[in-house]
Amino acid sequence: MERTYAKDVRGAEEIRVSGFVDTIRNKKKMAFIVLRDVTGKVQITVEKGEHPELDAAVDQITADSVITVIGKAVESEYVKLGGVEIYPRSIIIESLAAPLPIDREEQKGHEKSSIDQRIDYRWIDLRTERNLLLFKAQSVMVAAMREYLLGKNFTEIHTPKLIGAASESGADVFEVKYFDKTAYLAQSPQFYKQMAMAAGFERIFEVGPVFRAEKSYTNKHTTEFTGFDLEFSYIDSYRDVMKMEEGLLIYALGKVKEACGSDIERLFGTPVIVPDKPFPVVKLADLYAGLKEDYGYECPEGEEGDLTTEAERMSFEWTKKHFDSEFLFVTDYSAEKRAFYHMRDENGVPQGYDLIWRGCEITTGAQREHRYDVLKAQCDEKGLTEDVKFYLEFFKYGCPPHGGFGLGVDRLTMLLLGLTIKEAMFIFRSPSRLNP
């Protein structure tokens, strides 16, 4: 007999369901089991004393045990779970669960375990409707971004994560032993995205792991995450890149709202807001001036060329006040604070931006420098020429003008649902956590 999911259970003479035991109430004459699977919950009702084998099974079952139930599904207006209950003919105990080492949710007399305790037993912590929804929403979002780009003639590629030279600056990378050599885990697919431009692919994207050897202990940093990166050729300016990102995010958030917006608001208490375009754009210096005028914020001396964490956080309220938007493009950073491969204008200003969503940076995007001689000079300026010698080769034999950006899938999920990064990832990694 084929398995039926909880959401599809209707009145039937013979039905088979499988899943975890969400709750069990074992009374003298009746027992009620709520079975949970990936689609929802269904009630199993056992009339005790009629079938000894069922009574014996019920007496063994514990919360979070895995069972299969075969029986008759009966529709009833008195049953809250979908208006249907199953009277079992057979209960198969697939796996008995020991007492759980964590409290996943707040219950009467029990506080919810800390996030670090729950991560220790992440596979148990994930067994909730809320966490299932988290990854459903993330799946919808990533699928929508893929769909959007494929509709614009992008090609998906997969770049190597083991590389022979420390990417970008040589800092913040993990060294690994590679036979008799030293290799590095890629901190972004940046160099290979640009190689694809030099290869004439014109429009590419990638979804894959990214590694950052940063000893950061914040609610938004992690040493390994999933990146969504894209690059495309024949642009006129970095504003073409900003326009592409606008369209991508509007489309993706629209799909998330359509698929699970009401469930997100019910379980996470936050609405999915689909933004309008264009997103507001402000120069970094003007943002600092606005924060000073509205909130008395003074940028620390020497930090004027980059966006401080505090200013980033405050920008959310400022953006809502002046533009009624959750998104803000910030431009005109100093060349000292931007990567060497960002194109600069005649005044030396990098042709790129950061995108801030709800007071948190989600993207650094830019038009790239594609002219070999200019790019090499910018490498020389930062003392990186030898480190990125292989990368410079990509531009010797012709390369179209291009630009792109990268998004952290986990950070997007975090901001969408109002979580910390630890809660938003399937498995969190930090300088002090390598398990589970």
Image (cartoon, rainbow, N blue to C red):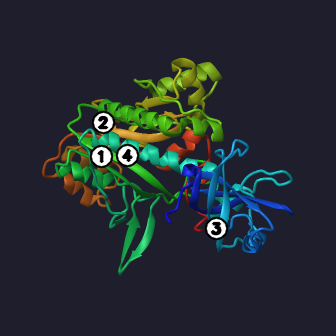
Disc sitting over residue 378 in the figure: 1
Q: CA distance from mark 1 to mark 3?
A: 63 Å
In front of the other: 424 or 78? 78
Q: Are marks 1 and 2 in contact (CB under 8 Å)?
A: yes
In space, the residues marked 4 and 3 are separated at their CA atoms by 55 Å
Report how far apart the C-alphas of labels 3 and 2 lie in the structure. Answer: 63 Å
For badge 1, the amino acid type reads: Gln
Q: Earlier in the sequence, mark 1 or mark 2?
A: 2
- Which residue is situated farthest in the left direction here? 397
Q: CA distance from mark 1 to mark 2?
A: 10 Å
**Mark sitting earlier along the chain (1/3):** 3
Q: Nearer the viewer, mark 3 or mark 2?
A: 3
Q: Is residue 253 left or right of residue 63?
A: left
Q: CA distance from mark 1 to mark 4?
A: 9 Å
| Callout 3 amino acid | Ile
Q: Which residue is mark 3?
A: 67
The label number, if any, that marks residue 344 in the structure image? 2
Identify residue for label 4: 339
Nearest to N terminus: mark 4 or mark 3: 3
